């Protein structure tokens, strides 16, 4: 486990994030399974393909979506969930 | 009423059975009893590449390289690399016999994302007895190597009445090795396992003890290792959906190119099995009689047809219905509402005995081409 509020993290390099024409949505593929992603989840995860901190991630999202309220809290909740499912992993520097 | 709308289904999972050749001889193998005597009709590399491209076009995303033993195929690395480039998430399902550190590294570069290694016992002797090869130490070494190279790894331990008491030992071994994921998979009674059923089906007491041991382990070791315990279908009261619904999610291609809704569908007599050498995967998936025949609920007879749970289990497994009753349209006899449930109850009753020396001495029919030939001769 890692502290995503301190550590840098990125999308699990063993998972695959891609758009699926047949399903008309983005999916995240992992060992023997997949999950269909919401637009919000895609918007966050596609920014995590390289090492990033949650502060950098939130700043980037706020810049691109200035009208969104309480964005930071939602993103933090998402990251906790994503971490518990191994969608994101810590980067050891 | 459910009308099968053929284009709403996506074969998310492609199981590529690259070859039936295997260095192991497990007596519960899910491969057909009729094994080809040689490999000359196996699909070529080019043919597999075409199959994978067509499956990808239909929307397949998960790809399992299986067999037999997929490592027997000299083009495995090439197929993995091509599949990864096409956008598949590649899983390798292997006994680890034939695997080397160098191959693991090549597969990783090619894009393998997950490797599942099977064990036939939690120690050298049991593993050798049921796998028919002395491979235990090699499996341990390769398990460590896969973990060291950072590829997600699952261990699969196949359970039956003669090794089910080893669950605790196996879980400890898996944890010591650093496995992330363990599947304790009871043998299901198809193909070779059905043939050997009276020597393999555990008693209810054995099963309960194994589940209790699994739960004790989960309580004591709240670590990262995820453990799944799969009971034999025979001990359930309701059947499982066939492959998440016949012709809805899974597509299997056999070594010689037959296209099936599940691994064992070829045991059902009287069906035509489409082949990738005769048509496109898309045409087969959408229109072949094999795939449309048991999609949805239209095909059902009683007691399924009027059952309020018919959409939940879709009548269960067609192969099991055929194997046990001779009628592929029958309710899966696992179901307690099946008029044929007694066939399952009787098998369980026969298993309600202690494992004796006699059990161990009873000859198991091992899965190999010589036994396959003998079985074929017996049938004719």
Image (cartoon, rainbow, N blue to C red):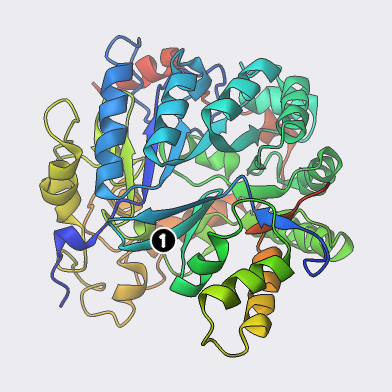
Q: Which residue is mark 1?
A: A26
Q: Quadrant of residue B94?
A: top right
**What chain is tagged by disc 1?**
A
Residue B43 appears in view: no
From the viewer's side, name the closer residue of B255 and B119.
Answer: B255
Secondary structure beneath dot 1 equals strand
User: Considering the image in quadrants, where does the C terminus of chain B appear?
Assistant: top left
Q: Is residue B188 left or right of residue A91?
A: left
Above or below, comparing residue A89 to residue B367 in the picture: below
Q: Residue at x 40, y 25 (%)?
A: B18
Q: Is residue A22 left or right of residue B182?
A: left
Q: Is residue B123 left or right of residue B95?
A: right
Q: Quadrant of residue B302?
A: bottom left
**In x, y percent, where is residue B85?**
41, 34
Q: Residue at x 61, y 16 (%)?
A: B98
Above or below, comparing residue A43 to residue B169 in the picture: below
């Amino acid at each position: 486990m890692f502290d995503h509020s301190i550590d840098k993290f990125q999308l699990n390099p063993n998972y695959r994030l891609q758009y699926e024409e047949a399903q008309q949505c983005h999916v995240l593929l992992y060992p023997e399974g997949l999950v269909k992603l919401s637009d919000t989840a895609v918007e966050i995860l596609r920014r995590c393909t390289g090492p990033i901190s949650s502060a950098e991630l939130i700043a980037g999202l706020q810049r691109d979506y200035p009208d969104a309220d309480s964005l930071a809290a939602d993103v933090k909740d998402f990251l906790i969930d994503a971490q518990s499912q191994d969608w994101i992993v810590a980067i050891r520097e | 009423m459910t009308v099968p709308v053929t284009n709403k289904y996506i074969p998310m999972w492609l199981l590529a059975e690259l070859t039936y050749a295997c260095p192991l001889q497990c007596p519960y193998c899910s491969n057909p009893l009729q094994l080809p005597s040689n490999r000359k009709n196996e699909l070529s590399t080019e043919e597999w590449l075409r199959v994978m491209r067509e499956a990808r076009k239909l929307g397949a995303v998960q790809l399992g390289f299986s067999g037999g033993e997929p490592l027997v195929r000299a083009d495995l690395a090439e197929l993995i690399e091509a599949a990864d480039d096409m956008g598949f998430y590649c899983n390798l399902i292997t006994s680890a016999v034939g695997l080397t550190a160098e191959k693991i590294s090549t597969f990783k570069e090619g894009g393998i994302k997950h490797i599942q290694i099977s064990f036939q016992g939690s120690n050298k002797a049991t593993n050798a007895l049921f796998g028919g090869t002395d491979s235990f130490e090699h499996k341990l070494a390769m398990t460590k190597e896969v973990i060291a190279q950072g590829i997600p790894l699952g261990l699969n331990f196949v359970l039956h009445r003669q090794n089910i008491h080893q669950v605790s030992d196996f879980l400890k071994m898996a944890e010591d090795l650093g496995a992330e994921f363990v599947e304790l998979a009871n043998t299901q009674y198809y193909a070779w396992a059905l043939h050997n059923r009276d020597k393999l089906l555990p008693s209810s007491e054995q099963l309960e003890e194994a589940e209790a041991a699994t739960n004790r382990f989960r309580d004591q070791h709240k670590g990262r290792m995820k453990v799944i315990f799969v009971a034999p279908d025979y001990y359930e009261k309701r059947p499982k959906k066939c492959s998440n619904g016949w012709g809805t999610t899974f597509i299997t291609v056999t070594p010689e190119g037959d296209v099936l809704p599940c691994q064992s569908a070829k045991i059902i007599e009287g069906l035509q099995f489409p082949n990738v050498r005769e048509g496109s995967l898309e045409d087969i998936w959408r229109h072949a009689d094999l795939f449309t025949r048991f999609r949805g609920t239209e095909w059902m007879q009683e007691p399924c047809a009027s059952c309020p749970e018919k959409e939940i289990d879709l009548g269960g497994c067609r192969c099991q219905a055929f194997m046990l009753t001779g009628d592929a349209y029958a309710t899966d006899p696992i179901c307690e509402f099946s008029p044929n449930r007694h066939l399952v109850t009787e098998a369980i009753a026969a298993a309600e005995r202690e494992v004796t020396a006699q059990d161990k001495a009873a000859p198991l029919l091992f899965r190999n081409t010589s036994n396959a030939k003998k079985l074929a001769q017996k049938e004719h």
